[in-house]
Amino acid sequence: MDPDKIERAMGRLQKTHPRVARFFTLRHESGKRGDRGKLVCTRDDEKFGQAGELCGNYVLRTNQSLGAARIWLIYMTLLQAEEGYACLKGSLGLRPNYHQIEKRVEAHVFISVLAYHLLCWVRERLRERGDMRDWKTVRRLLSTHSLVTTRMPLEDGRVLHIRKPTIPDAEQAQVFQKLGIDWKAEFPPQKRFVKR
């Protein structure tokens, strides 16, 4: 094989995985003519050991004389607030805000904050019942549970619309149960006749 191609492939590999690449040195040793050679991977044990010592440890510094439990609680509150702002900007859709009229901007922000309060209630309710999954996981899990409308044309010219929920799978039903939601009662089938 061409040594230049091998070097480029090793560079791409290191660029793709920089967190691992910092601990390893790769080099290609070419063999005899016609031989592919070999790839030599050497680990920097000193850097690897230093990173291992830091793994799983938090160092929190403050100018306040508070106990460790209180400092940790404040830190976790800060993390929840940051996660909330990220959620407002991301999955709850606070940004981008394309409205031109002030009342519409205020309404958009109000609905987003209302949605965030609902989100906090859902997360807290699940945590109280031992479900520690983050919002993205819960949202992805519940995203496949939906309402379905079936349209049936009748002989008299009307169209019957029947709207009902899909049946939740076991995990979705468990989340609904933990939230105290009776999905059958909340989403009863609805029939509606429409003229064509």
Image (spheres, rainbow, N blue to C red):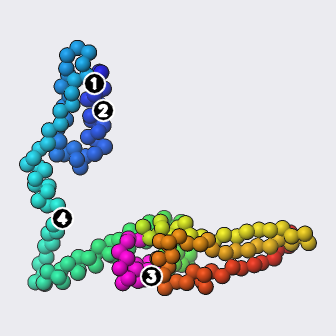
Q: Which residue is mark 2?
A: 9
Pick whichever, 119 or 107, lies toward us: 119
Q: What crowding class fits label 1: few (fewer than 14 Cα within 10 Å), some (14-19), or many (20 or more)?
A: few
Query: Alpha carbon of mark 1 to alpha carbon of mark 2: how far?
Result: 9 Å
Q: Which residues are magenta?
A: 117-136
Q: Position of residue 66 (x, y in %)?
A: 13, 84
Q: Which residue is mark 4?
A: 56
Query: Alpha carbon of mark 3 to alpha carbon of mark 1: how far?
Result: 58 Å
Pick whichever, 75 or 85, lies toward us: 75
Tell me which label, 3 or 4, sits earlier in the chain: 4
Query: Alpha carbon of mark 3 to alpha carbon of mark 4: how far?
Result: 31 Å
Tell me which label, 1 or 4, sits earlier in the chain: 1
Q: Which residue is mark 1?
A: 4
Q: Give the residue type that dot 3 points to.
A: Lys
Q: Position of residue 43 (x, y in %)?
A: 14, 42
Q: Is residue 61 left or right of residue 161?
A: left
Pick whichever, 184 or 61, lies toward us: 184
Q: Is residue 69 left or right of residue 162?
A: left
Query: Alpha carbon of mark 1 to alpha carbon of mark 4: how far?
Result: 40 Å
Tell me which label, 2 or 3, sits earlier in the chain: 2
Q: What crowding class fits label 4: few (fewer than 14 Cα within 10 Å), some (14-19), or many (20 or more)?
A: few
Q: Verify CB contact (< 8 Å) between mark 2 and mark 3.
A: no
Q: Main secondary structure of the magenta part?
A: helix
Q: Position of residue 74 (x, y in %)?
A: 23, 80
Query: Alpha carbon of mark 2 to alpha carbon of mark 3: how far?
Result: 50 Å
Q: Is residue 161 left or right of residue 134?
A: right
Is residue 116 placed above or below 155 in the rendered structure? below
Pick whichever, 77 or 47, lies toward us: 47
- Please identify the quadrant where the C terminus is shown: bottom right
- Which is more foreground, mark 3 or mark 1? 3
Determine if residue 165 is in view: yes
Q: Which residue is mark 3?
A: 178
